[in-house]
């Protein structure tokens, strides 16, 4: 029994580590970012309170009969509001000492006097306290899972006019008391609908599992519920790219977990090496990390140099093959790997280059098969909501897979092939990477003033936020539009083979 307890104690740290999946992408929203959200949220709350519907009020007190209908909010004054992080409960939103101006239709009967008209009323000392609880739902999307609300009205005044003004003011206690009760009862249901229905429809615009292009997709599902401190809210996303033909395949994350310590900017987004590695692994699985140049596509200077380098081999061939066009097949042999250091970001690529003669109506004749190793520097930047990468070839070497002597003979090809990569291959790759991938933010919200900082094993992007669209505009856009399924349903029309066969054009 004691031995079993000791074994359990030894296993506990391992079990805890196994249950905590490191994120490939992490987002931190700071209190400064929350201040911006507060201003936009306050406008949204005003619009919701302006649309409050209050039931008709009717009754009698002695000989006084009254009927109040067509209640309409005319004006709102919300001078004091506060939105802040609250550990455990996540978000607290308070409105203090607000005022609401109303106008409604009156029908009053007192003894033999009957009067119809309108009344202007004001509710003062309005206090609203709401707490929103955030959680991830079953598909890994951020949601407002619960809301608590408490609303009160300190005083209410109704203004009467006309010959019976003094009588109405004396009897208005019944009307004012009833109206204050009905109005206070409608505030929280209105805000609850705004949060659990309307704001959640806004959160539905955050990408969870989307296709990036015809080959790969990205999984931005939350790994766990948000972590909230008095100054920050942290969201851990899986941040894994996947090959569309094998969507259920998982790539294990052994990278360093991003750690965000800064709080000076409105928002921080961190990406681990796993985020970039999974993208390159998915493209490798799709078999698209390859390119083929044949005939006139091979630069003339390079063709002359290749024929000179392999002159001995070509000389021994059948004369009908000697003048055949050249074919160069460059294909990545293993998924590229990303390394992030404080000094910069680099990507290591291993590939092979097959050089052949391709005579018409005859099998191809291979002249050489050489291995290539290169290191690319990567400049990562954020534009709008898209993460983009600019690659540059830094180091490059080739060697023979057959013998060291042949590797020595290939030394003269080093510079020309590097030039070929820089002028022909790199522009194609950068054309693809500059399209970028979207960061998981709601529609209508963008980044500004971005600054990228490298760390050991991950990089962070600090930025401020900007609303390009109002909350109401985005919500109305998607109110009648069905939500996008969390799991993509479309499948690629073709099933590409593994990366080691049949190269595809980049």
Image (tube, grey):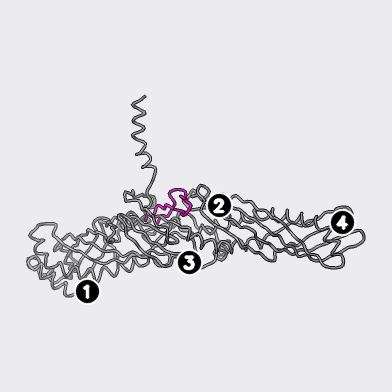
- Residue 466: mark in rendering: 3
| Marker disc for residue 99 | none
Q: Which residue is drawn at 9% across and 57% down?
A: 403
Q: Which of marks 3 and 4 is nearer the N terminus?
A: 4
Distance in Å between CA atoms under marks 1 and 4: 100 Å
SS at mark 1 in the image: helix
Of label 2 and label 3, which has the lower sequence position? 2
* Marks 2 and 1, how far apart at CA: 65 Å
Q: Tell me if residue 450 can be seen.
A: yes
> Dot 3, how many residues are within 10 Å of its Cα: few (below 14), some (14-19), or many (20+)?
some
Q: Which of marks 3 and 1 is in front?
A: 3
Of badges 1 and 4, nearer the viewer stands 4
Assess whether residue 28 is covered by the magenta stretch. Answer: no
Quadrant in which the N terminus appears: top left
Left or right of residue 367: residue 280 = right
Between the C-alphas of marks 3 and 4, the distance is: 56 Å
For the residues labelled 2 and 4, the Cα–Cα distance comes to: 44 Å
From the image, tell me which residue sits under label 4.
Answer: 64
Asked whether the residues under the numbered discs 3 and 4 touch, taking CB atoms below 8 Å apart as contact, a structural biologist would say no
Q: Could you tell me residue 253's position as x and y percent?
A: 34, 49
The label on residue 296 is: 1
**Residue at the image point whose x is 76% and y is 54% from the top:** 178
* Image x and y of residue 417, in percent: 18, 68
Q: In the image, which residues are magenta?
A: 218-241
Residue closer to the observer: 191 or 298: 191
Quarter holding the C terminus is: bottom left
Q: What element carries label 4?
A: strand
Q: In this view, does 394 lie above or below 141?
A: below
């Amino acid at each position: 029994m004691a031995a079993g307890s000791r074994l359990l104690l030894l296993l506990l740290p391992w079990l805890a580590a196994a249950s905590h999946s490191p994120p490939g992408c992490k987002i931190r929203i700071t209190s400064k970012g929350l201040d911006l959200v507060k201003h936009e949220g306050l406008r949204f709350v005003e619009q919701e309170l302006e649309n409050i519907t209050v039931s008709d009020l009717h009754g009698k007190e002695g000989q006084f009969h009254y009927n109040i209908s067509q209640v309409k909010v005319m004006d709102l004054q919300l001078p004091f509001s506060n939105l802040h992080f609250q550990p455990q409960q996540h978000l607290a939103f308070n409105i203090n000492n607000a005022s609401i101006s109303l106008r409604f239709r009156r029908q009053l009967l007192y003894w033999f006097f009957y009067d119809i008209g309108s009344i202007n009323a004001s509710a003062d000392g309005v206090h609203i306290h709401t707490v929103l609880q955030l959680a991830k739902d079953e598909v890994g999307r951020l949601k407002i899972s619960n809301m608590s609300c408490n609303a009160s009205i300190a005083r209410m005044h109704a203004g009467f006019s006309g010959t019976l003004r003094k009588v109405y003011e004396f009897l208005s206690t019944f009307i004012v008391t009833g109206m204050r009760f009905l109005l206070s009862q409608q505030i929280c249901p209105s805000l609850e609908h705004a949060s659990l229905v309307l704001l959640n429809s806004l959160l539905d615009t955050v990408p969870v599992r989307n296709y990036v292009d015809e080959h790969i997709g990205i999984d931005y599902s939350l790994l766990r519920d948000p972590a909230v401190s008095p100054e920050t809210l942290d969201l851990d996303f899986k941040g894994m790219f996947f090959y569309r033909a094998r969507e259920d395949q998982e790539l294990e994350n052994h990278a360093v977990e991003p750690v965000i310590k800064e709080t000076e900017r409105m928002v921080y987004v961190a990406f681990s090496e796993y985020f970039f590695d999974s993208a390159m692994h998915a493209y490798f699985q799709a078999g698209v990390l390859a390119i083929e140049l044949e005939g006139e596509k091979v630069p003339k200077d390079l063709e002359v140099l290749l024929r000179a380098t392999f002159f001995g081999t070509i000389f021994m061939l059948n004369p009908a093959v000697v003048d055949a066009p050249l074919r160069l097949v460059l294909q990545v042999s293993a998924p590229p790997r990303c390394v992030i250091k404080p000094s910069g970001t680099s990507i290591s690529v291993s590939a092979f280059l097959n050089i052949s003669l391709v005579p018409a109506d005859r099998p191809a004749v291979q002249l050489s098969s050489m291995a290539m190793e290169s290191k690319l520097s990567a400049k990562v930047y954020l534009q709008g909501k898209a993460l983009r990468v600019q690659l540059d070839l830094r180091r490059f070497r080739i060697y023979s897979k057959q013998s060291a002597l042949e590797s020595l003979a290939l030394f003269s090809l080093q510079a020309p092939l590097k030039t070929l990569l820089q002028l022909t291959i790199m522009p194609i790759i950068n054309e693809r990477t500059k399209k970028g991938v979207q960061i998981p933010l709601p529609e209508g919200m963008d980044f500004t003033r971005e600054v990228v900082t490298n760390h050991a094993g991950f990089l962070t992007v600090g930025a401020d936020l900007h609303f390009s669209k109002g909350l109401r505009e985005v919500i109305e856009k998607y109110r009648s539009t069905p939500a996008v399924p969390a799991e993509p349903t479309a499948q690629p029309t073709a099933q590409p083979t593994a990366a080691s066969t049949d190269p595809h054009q980049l």
